[in-house]
Amino acid sequence: MEEERTDKGGKPLRVLISGGGTGGHIFPALSIANEVRRRLPDAEILFVGALGRMEMERVPAAGYEIKGLPVRGFDRRKLWKNIGVLLDLRRSMKMARDILAEFKPDVAVGVGGYASGPMLKEAQKQGVPTLLQEQNSYAGVTNKLLAKGAKVICVAYEGMERFFPAEKIVLTGNPVRRNLLECEASPEEARRAFGLEPERRTVLIIGGSLGARTINNSIIAGLDEIGKSDVQVIWQTGKFYDSQCREALESSGVKNVLQMPFISNMDMAYRAANIVISRAGASSISELQLLGKASILVPSPNVAEDHQTKNALALVNRNAALMIADANAEQQLVPTMLRTVTVDDTIAALEQNVKQMALPNAAERIVDHLLQL
């Protein structure tokens, strides 16, 4: 396919990718860009994000150019503040038109998040074919608004016809970081890489890109219990909660917990773990599915339409994960974790069932459809 798709007239293909706000939007966007670049090394790729959001750092670090729009979310509590929000939206629409005039993309991709709204809307108005990538089982507001003008909508869950026109939907799965799938270390080797005991049951705790207050507080509340157990823990707290969690761990005297603000080698961390404690963002769930990892999910209640609970239930209903509500986590998370990690049959069943839900090669499938546009 690659030979056919360089572009009309031999010009490099120009791909605009817009969206972000969280790792759950950024990782799929970068995976799509990397797959385009793998197939077409001369393709020109431009990202458009929201100023002040995570993508403005993560995208350049991955080697891509990004432009920022001043767009932001509506304030539902202080309605008077939305005058400024509307002015920023108007400015963003103007900037989006300027970006289109300068970059002249052959195709535009929206992955959700604030910036993709004005950027993809303007692209659609100007006749640029657009592809949407929806990560969650409950569609985001931006993608729902853009669906009518999109050519293709790539989804990771069945039953998305309730949000999007059925004839535009393609079930592709969510792209994940390629290095996670290429790790060949054994669990014992991965544990040694973290300075842990190679044969000991291991739990990996991750709260998402920024950490998670409830998960961290639940671990702090259960440190004594963890310290008395035969389990060892890798605990990613997020930078924001680093000092609080480190001080709690030091004062507890517990030695079988390795705490850090950020794990750079997530491929090894997943390999080391018998079970994973995580929020239920779409990217996290796709990683758990593709890697076949047993998990206990604690959905964040602070997301649109409570979509993380819906993501988690898609697994729980197939015995592919356990779930603890955010409100119950401080009482239930550590006891459930310590009880589950020692039961081989439970872990094996969760691993088998979650692996069956995986949709591999998502980035490749999405780029197939992108190139067809």
Image: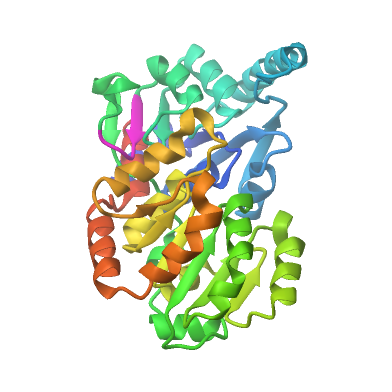
Q: Is residue 160 magenta?
A: no
Residue 254 found in image quarter: bottom right
Q: Is residue 159 above or below residue 5?
A: above
Which residue is at the front of the view, 41 or 119?
119
156 sits left or right of 50 in the view: left
What is the x, y in percent for residue 357? 25, 51
Residue in the image at 41% along x and 23% along y: 129
Towards the viewer: 63 or 206: 206
Rendered view: 38 above or below 372: below
Range of residues picked out in magenta: 152-158
Percent position (x, y) of residue 11? 47, 36
Residue 228 x/y as whole percent: 54, 81
Query: Can residue 42 be spotted in the picture?
Result: no
Residue 248 to residue 165: above or below: below
Specify the quadrant of the image occupied by residue 342.
Answer: bottom left
Which is nearer the eye, 62 or 320? 320
> Which quarter of the figure is the C terminus placed in?
top left
Q: Is residue 320 left or right of residue 304?
A: left
Any part of residue 22 in sight: yes
